Amino acid sequence: MQQTIFFSEAGLKIVTNPFLVGDELLELATQSSVDFLKQLHSDTKQLSTVKHPVCLLNILRGGRYYGLESAWKRLYDTKEPKLHLAEIRAGRYLNAGTKEWNCNVWFDEEISSMSPFYSKQNLLKCQTLIIGDTIATGSTLKAFSCVSFFQKKKKKGKIKKKVREPLTVYIFSIAGSSIVAKNLRSLVKELQTNDKINVHLYLANAAWELNEENGTDLSLVTSRDNIHPKAFEYIDKICGKNFAKHMKCAVWDWGQRFDGIDEHLKEVVEYFHTFHPADLPPHIRKHNLHTLHVYLVLAIKTDYTMTVFEYFNCISVKKQNLFSNRLMKK
């Protein structure tokens, strides 16, 4: 599997600031997706080597928040090259027996923007597949490769391969781990040999070190071979050499940063509150103190229904301070 690490400043802003949520985070994710598509555009000679139809697979819910469809429209403002869409739902779980991460994959009509029928049709017809998703252990991608889209099928007791054209898969991750290539090596080799499926992995800025104890957290500290030189300089400047290792995770719970914003911010505040404010990077210290402040205010003013997310939607820090002072006087 070919792996490409490319520079994306928008992606770095995401992984170094867990207080980014909602629309602001989606805009940065979309910009990082634009950076990926520009890199792909360059690597494929202006997409001349990309075979059509091209399908974008959103793995719900997190993949939808990569903004790849919007990024494609920004980069290619005409109707061609056309991008088809497919959506599946995926849920990871830790196998109690094997202690390994596994994943269930299914079509979810309740939250999907399209019917399973059209998702399946677009997946089966495409010759180029683009997937945007946060990658830790790679269990989601392993599970997806086992659905009927890839599998051989039985017919009258015999195994018969599905007839389809060779497929190229481009996987893009704003936050991907350094063990993904290793974990997927055997699977990718099998897909390439048996099904003529080639897989290319694109990682924004770095292949982050995975905390294998919880199978989730991606450390901002990684080997120099696994990080873009500009990304290394950026993290060193923003987080500092001594604190980068304490940033806990490059992405946290990606979906929760959109669908469970208050819960996410509470978790972030609780974590950084264990450090002395003087030890925190300036941008973390600023956000942490403001967020902690509003939690204290809301805890006291139980009759006030404002959420933390609404608080952060105040246009400026000055307005946040004025708003907090007004609440304190209530």
Image (tube, helix red, strand yellow):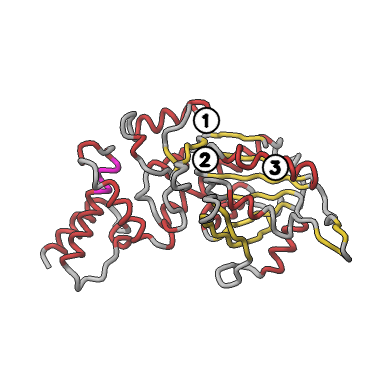
For the N terminus, the quadrant is top right
| Amino acid under disc 1 | Asn
Q: Is residue 44 left or right of residue 224?
A: right
Q: Main secondary structure of the magenta part?
A: helix
Residue 312 position, x and y percent, is 30, 57
Q: Is residue 329 left or right of residue 294?
A: left
Q: Residue 188: which numbered mark, if any?
A: 3
Marks 3, 1: nearer the viewer: 3
Residue 74 position, x and y percent, is 58, 50
Q: CA distance from mark 1 to mark 2?
A: 10 Å
| Amino acid under disc 3 | Val
User: Crowding at label 1, few (<14), some or many (≥20) Cα neighbours within 10 Å?
Assistant: some
User: Magenta span covers which residues?
Assistant: 283-288
User: Crowding at label 3, few (<14), some or many (≥20) Cα neighbours within 10 Å?
Assistant: many
For the C terminus, the quadrant is bottom left
Q: Residue 226: which numbered mark, if any?
A: 1
Looking at marks 1 and 2 on the same chain, the residue that comes earlier in the sequence is marked by 2
Looking at marks 3 and 1 on the same chain, the residue that comes earlier in the sequence is marked by 3
| Amino acid under disc 2 | Ser
Residue beneath disc 2: 177
- Depicted 320 relative to depicted 209: above or below: below
